[in-house]
Amino acid sequence: MIARGRYRLMLFVAADVVLIMLPFYSSCGRERTVRTVREEIKRNLPLGSTSSQVIAFLDAKHIGHSELVRAKSSSDYPGEHDIRLILASIPLKPGLMSEWGIFMSFRFDESDRLIDYRVNLLGT
């Protein structure tokens, strides 16, 4: 009887360990980083891509984004005016006291062609 109780306890502990570790293993290899996002953009959105192509890319990757907007100024592009941008972000797992995300800005010329992009890790 004691052996059976000990066996059940061991099974219970083993099941708890699996349940606790499962989220860590299930996300292994799929975490997005600033580096991997930059590489994806570089590989899929060459300079000269249209704003529609950028939006299609972001939609396909399930990345939240704005539409193409005109801004009078932007902290990403100090000293420039009348900037055409698409802004996007990927929320990351929250920390103990803050939230982090990968934020992207895509800048376009007057013909709505991609001329620059920025990818940064920002926390609040």
Image (cartoon, helix red, strand yellow):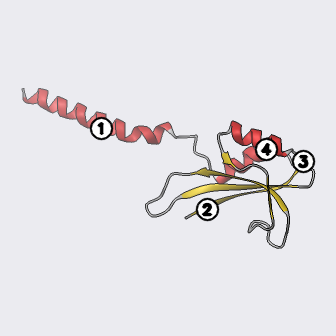
33 over 7 or under it: above or below: below
Report the residue marked by disc 4: 54
Residue depicted at 32% across the width and 39% down the height: 17
Earlier sequence position, callout 2 versus callout 1: 1
Q: Are marks 3 and 1 in contact (CB under 8 Å)?
A: no
Q: Position of residue 16 (x, y in %)?
A: 30, 38
Q: Are marks 2 and 3 in contact (CB under 8 Å)?
A: no
The kind of secondary structure element at disc 2 is: strand
* Mark 1 and mark 4: Cα distance apart in space: 43 Å
Is the C terminus in the top left, top right, bottom left or bottom right quadrant? bottom right
Q: Amino acid at mark 2?
A: Leu
* Mark 2 and mark 1: Cα distance apart in space: 34 Å
Q: Nearer the viewer, mark 4 or mark 2?
A: 4
* Mark 3 and mark 1: Cα distance apart in space: 52 Å
The kind of secondary structure element at disc 1 is: helix
Q: Amino acid at mark 1?
A: Asp
Q: Are marks 4 and 3 in contact (CB under 8 Å)?
A: no
